[in-house]
Amino acid sequence: MAELTGNKDAKNYGIGIPAKTEGFFLKGSCHYDWGMQDRLSRIFRPASGKTVMLAFDDGYIMGPTSGLERMDLSVVPLAEHCDVLMCTRGALRTCIPPVHNKPVCLRVSAGATILKELSDETVGVAIDDAIRCNASAMAVQVYVGSEFEHKTIANLTKVIDAGMRHGIPTLGVTAVGKQMVRDARYLGLAGRLIAELGAQFNKTYYCEEGFDTVVAACPIPIVIAGGKKIPEPDALGMAYKAIDQGALGVDMGRNIFQADNPIAMLKAVSAVVHEGEKPDKALDMYNTLKNEA
Ligand code: R5P
């Protein structure tokens, strides 16, 4: 039993000082519980409100993608230069030492490969294993308009429900089926749907026309996908334009780990995202770091 005698009298009540009602820095996220906001603050840096996520989950549908043949060799040196690792639980447990202490966005949808219909996915990770992996978020692919649209939307809602029970955010990933066009109308539809179904953030593609409307109509943070490898100046330009039009980060894979110098590219992308560096300056930075290496 606690000692009752000899304690100092409580007297520092701050009478007259109103208790602060804190807001939360992230779009659409001010009404979540503490654990959810804590995890979102690990994903998005509170100082800049933005994130650079390193995506290396490509192998779950494509096999040993160029640059990811040996994740222990190629990804591990990159870990300290990004904000979040986005990957499968298999990649995490086999190749990433837990000492990096980086937040993990765990890929939890699964079931398709490039050899068959990509939208035919299910939920491939139980919530208790996501918790064992200390996931700061879970990623689910959503194929609006594709053959298995309904199934992928159901996957999303199941994962959101499980995430809500445990305070883990869900990243709804706008996956564009072969027949779909990556324009503002399509990306806006998918992003809005993902937000309205309760995901905490949305990964989508940048589009040249009307990306600002995609961002405006999506009440949750948007991070842009990298997609297929494009020349470094174009990738930096795309990141700049997306951030300039309201995206709150990038979730890039091939445009990082397939670059001539992946660490330099990650640093240059990070300067664009967190410091608003212009693409030409970021490219200079990339070339300088690459030449120094
Ligand atoms: C969706 O999120 C996909 O699985 C991406 O293809 C994956 O995250 C890899 O990123 P990237 O397309 O930038 O290589």
Image: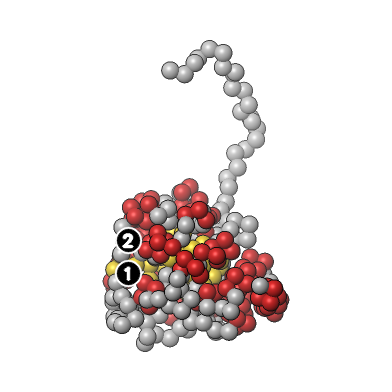
Establish whether ligand 1 lies closer than 8 Å to the Cβ of label 1. Answer: no
Task: Name the residue furthest top.
Answer: 5
The answer to whether residue 137 is left or right of residue 211 is left
Which of these two is toward me, 100 or 42? 100
Q: Amino acid at mark 2?
A: Val
- Where does residue 48 sit, x and y in percent of width and height? 63, 61
Q: Earlier in the sequence, mark 2 or mark 1?
A: 1
Which of these two is toward me, 164 or 92? 92
Q: Residue at x 47, y 54 (%)?
A: 98
Q: Residue at x 43, y 63 (%)?
A: 95
Residue to which mark 1 is pinned:
110
The answer to whether residue 277 is left or right of residue 212 is right
* Picture layout, residue 122 above or below residue 180: above
Labelled pair 2, 1 in contact (Cβ < 8 Å)? yes
Name the element at disc 2: loop
Residue to which mark 2 is pinned:
125
Instruction: Estimate the spatial distance between the alpha carbons at disc 2 and disc 1, rounded to whole Å.
Output: 8 Å
- Where does residue 74 sit, x and y in percent of width and height? 51, 70
Q: Residue at x 62, y 23 (%)?
A: 11
- Looking at the image, can residue 233 be seen? yes
Mark 2, other Cα within 10 Å: few <14 / some 14–19 / many ≥20: some
Disc sitting over residue 172 in the figure = none
- Where does residue 210 sit, x and y in percent of width and height? 54, 81
- Where does residue 114 sit, x and y in percent of width and height? 34, 81
* Picture layout, residue 35 above or below residue 67: above
User: For the image shown, how many numbered marks are present on the structure?
Assistant: 2
